[in-house]
Image (spheres, helix red, strand yellow):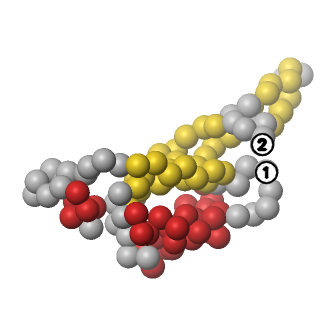
Amino acid sequence: MKKIEAYIRPEKLDDMKEILDSLKLNGLSVTQIMGCGNQKGWKEFVRGTQIDYNFVPKIKAELVVMDEQVDSVVNAIVRIAYTGDVGDGKIFVSNIENAVRIRTGESGTKAIQ
């Protein structure tokens, strides 16, 4: 099993949910976050004083999939999240040793299906 963490633009979330539904995946967690990278944020003037907003809003989407699903899920996220501009985001993939569904006690891949 693999955990996929995608940091994407907030306006791309609905498109991402549609793609994941079409791939018949369940178990998506979403967090609103603030981040900085090459995008660098923006500057505003408030009452004559310059304020630097170094953090920009992003969405962190997390899901756990079976090993054979990783490439198709990552490719789908890249396809919908791409704009070609700085700030499109990043995707991280990491190993998951085990998963347990609390309600049933199922573990392993049965817990994520």
In the rendered image, residue 104, in percent from the top left (x then y), is placed at: 10, 57
**Is residue 100 rendered to the left or right of residue 66?**
left
Q: Secondary structure at mark 2?
A: loop
Numbered badge on residue 86: 1
**Is residue 75 rendered to the left or right of residue 88?**
left
Q: Quadrant of the N terminus?
A: bottom left
Amino acid residing under circle 1? Val
The answer to whether the residue labelled 2 contacts the one labelled 1, judged by CB atoms less than 8 Å apart, is yes
| Of 101 and 60, the residue lying toward us | 101
What is the crowding at mark 2: few (fewer than 14 residues within 10 Å), some, or many (at least 20)? some
In the rendered image, residue 18, in percent from the top left (x then y), is placed at: 49, 73
In the rendered image, residue 61, in percent from the top left (x then y), is placed at: 49, 53
Q: Is residue 82 at all visible to an observer of this figure?
A: yes
Quarter of the view holding residue 82: bottom right
In the rendered view, tell whether residue 50 sits above or below residue 80.
above
Amino acid residing under circle 2? Gln
For disc 2, the marked residue is 39
